[in-house]
Image (cartoon, grey):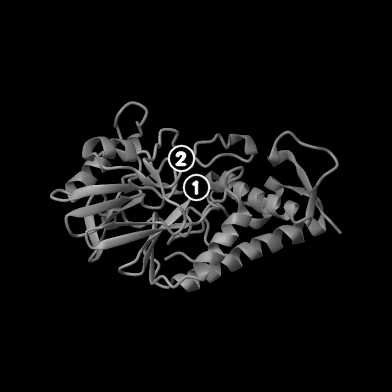
Amino acid sequence: MASSTSAPGAAIPDRSEWNTGLAVELEPLVRRVLAPNPSPYTFNGTQTYLIGNGRDVAVIDPGPAGTGPAGHADTNGDGHVEAILKATAGQRIVAIMCTHTHRDHSPAAGPLQAASGAPIIGCAALAIDDSSAGTGVRADAEFDPFYAPDRVLADGERLAGDGWTLEAVATPGHTSNHLCYALIESGALFTGDHVMGWSTTVVSPPDGDMAAYMLSLNKLQMRVDQVYYPAHGPAVTKPQQLVRGMIGHRRQREAQILRLLGEAPATIPEMVAQMYKGLDPRLTGAAGRSVLAHILDLEAKARIARGPQAAPQAAEQQWTLIA
């Protein structure tokens, strides 16, 4: 498992270990099917979870869609819907549940619903253009504009099937519509992108919100879940320890920003160059997004201010420390 302080882009394991497209049992009520969409942001791909070993099964994060119906095309997901259907043969899919609507998580919901007739239940619809933030968009994080839930779950609302119960845990921050799902029978928590087993998540304004993200981490720290199953990376077997480390990591990043601005006014690209030495150049934009999220949070707390000259793009804006 990567430490909580690692950045996206950690080493991807040997392809032979991935078991892409195969249903792997993690515990009696939980199986995992890995989508064929590895990248520096998704690690070895999006992990779709199948909940239930009886007649009913729920599908969490169906993933990228592949060559499905019009409007759902995404070649990175080719064959994944078919792999889910094969893994659930003989069972009835009773719910298709998404943690959030980035396009590596939710686009397969439409084709899977068309094939199974199951309702889409879970997070709210959200499709925005976040390119205006001016620090570059991570390629896999575009929102799915075609996601259409039949039912939106509120925080604490439950959905039950044959031998299993899932409870929605609202965790805004990575996105405003992010939900985790707790499996009541085993103490597992499906954490989507809020907590991942290989890196910290990207918090990308305008929808990503650092203050909300930190509150959601604190919320998880108060829970007693036994294991986390993230959408990317290995299971987290010491969840409280990891969450504490993630909170500490974000506080360190905030302290870095305040220290740099205490030395001299700076732009976000200038701060990224100092804070993320040796970063894969493909990930510079994503790092800038998370720094921007910290910047906006610090601005709201009146710890920093914009420079005297307003800039049209966030990447060009100079920031100063408030004495």
- Furthest toward the top, the residue is 70
Pick the residue in front: 145 or 39.
145
The residue where tag 2 is placed is 125
- State the image coordinates of residue 107 (x, y, percent, origin top left): 37, 38
Determine the residue positioned at 31% across, 61% down.
165
Residue shown at the point (21%, 54%) measured from the top left: 56
Q: Which mark is residue 85?
A: none
To which residue does mark 1 refer?
177
Q: Amino acid at mark 1?
A: Asn
Q: Residue furthest left?
A: 90
The x, y position of residue 50, in whole percent, is 27, 54
The percent coordinates of residue 211 (x first, y second) are 63, 56
Q: Residue at x 78, y 57 (%)?
A: 303
Looking at the rendered structure, the kind of residue marked 2 is Ala
Pointer 2 or 1: first along the chain? 2
The answer to whether residue 299 is visible is yes
Q: What residue do we see at 45% from left, 64% from top?
A: 2
Disc 2 is placed on an element classified as loop
Name the side, left or right, on which 85 lies relative to 39. Answer: left
Relative placement, left or right, of 237 versus 87 is: right
Question: Do the numbered discs 2 and 1 sit on residues whose CB atoms are within 8 Å?
Answer: yes
Q: Mark 1: few, some, or many residues within 10 Å (few <14, many ≥20)?
A: many
